[in-house]
Amino acid sequence: IVSFCWQHFVMTEVENHLQQHLDATLARIEVDVSCMVVRSIQDCNFSVSIADPQQPDCPLISVSEGFCELTGYDRDTILGQNCRFLNDGCDIRPSDREGLRISARTGKHFTGVLRNLKADGTPF
């Protein structure tokens, strides 16, 4: 019986070690894939932005060169900000604002046209 208990303990320790290794490997793969996606858009000539809804205030974590050209902002200024800085000072209809809130909270589809401002104040 002692031998069996020892073997069970050893297997449990081995299983725990393997599970920890597997969890760490899967987390690393997930980060690597996320990093690849984030890096892959940076040189795009069209406007693309990626925000991270798992971080507080959903900051932008990557923007394309096309996004920088469209908005007139450089990447270092943009990253880490919520994209609402683009419509700071713009009037947003209450129905659009509510639609955005509901979409952010529930994940439901929302379509609207929001006015944004370039770095030089030009609307787009």
Image (cartoon, rainbow, N blue to C red):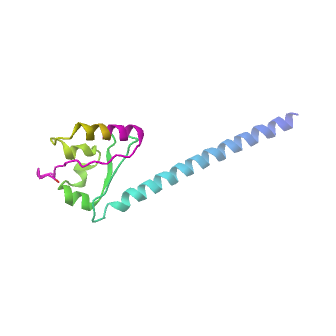
For the residue pair 29 and 88, the one nearer the viewer reads as 88
Q: Position of residue 124 (x, y in %)?
A: 17, 54
Report the magenta stretch's main SS: loop
Q: Residue at x 31, y 57 (%)?
A: 48
Segment tinted magenta in the rendering: 100-123
Q: Residue at x 28, y 49 (%)?
A: 79
Q: How many marks?
A: 0
Q: Position of residue 56 (x, y in %)?
A: 35, 37
Q: Is residue 56 visible?
A: no
Q: Residue at x 25, y 62 (%)?
A: 66
- Is residue 65 highlighted in magenta? no
In the picture shown, does residue 4 fall above or below 46?
A: above
Q: Position of residue 9 (x, y in %)?
A: 76, 37
For the residue pair 87 and 50, the one nearer the viewer reads as 87
In the displayed image of the protein, which residue is found farthest to the right? 1
Q: Is residue 119 left or right of residue 50?
A: left
Quarter of the image with the N terminus in it: top right
Q: Is residue 44 left or right of residue 37?
A: left
For the residue pair 97 and 66, the one nearer the viewer reads as 97
- Quadrant of res 37: bottom left
- Is residue 101 highlighted in magenta? yes
Q: Residue at x 37, y 59 (%)?
A: 39
Q: Is residue 58 visible?
A: yes
Q: Position of residue 10 (x, y in %)?
A: 75, 41
In the displayed image of the protein, which residue is found farthest to the front? 95
